Amino acid sequence: MNIEWTPAAVASARRYIHDQRGIRAVGAAIAALADNPYPSPPAGFHRGRYHRLRAGDYRIMYVVDEDVVTIERVDRLVAQLGVHRDLVMA
């Protein structure tokens, strides 16, 4: 499998370049897609042609077309305090 990045994916990943540990985890997860583009949950999830892969604090959105994995976007997941805010602040 070949792996390609869209310009939008490169731009979204660059925002997190300061987080070297996270970017290394993203790179390792994307490299593993060459061997297995359909990882099982909880790391991988898909709906239609779009696939989502979790790597540490990051989510990678990608598409698989025949023998090419195209990385569409890399986003950092934000911890949601929401309901637990009272417990954290106490």
Image (tube, rainbow, N blue to C red):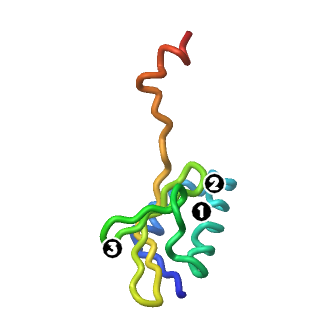
The N terminus appears in which quarter of the rendering?
bottom right
Spatial separation of the CA atoms under disc 1 and disc 3: 21 Å
Circle 3 is placed at which residue position? 49
- The image quarter in which residue 55 lies: bottom right
Circle 1 is placed at which residue position? 26
The amino acid type, in three-letter code, at marker 3 is: Arg
Is disc 3 placed on a helix, strand or loop? Answer: loop
The amino acid type, in three-letter code, at marker 1 is: Val
Q: Residues within 10 Å of mark 1 (few under 14, many from 20)?
A: many
The amino acid type, in three-letter code, at marker 2 is: Gly
Count of marks, rendered view? 3
Q: Nearer the viewer, residue 40 or 21?
A: 40
Q: Nearer the viewer, residue 30 or 24?
A: 30
2 or 3: mark nearer the eye: 3
1 or 3: mark nearer the eye: 3
Q: Residues within 10 Å of mark 3 (few under 14, many from 20)?
A: few
The residue depicted at 46 percent of the width and 55 percent of the height is 75
Is disc 1 placed on a helix, strand or loop? Answer: helix
Circle 2 is placed at which residue position? 22
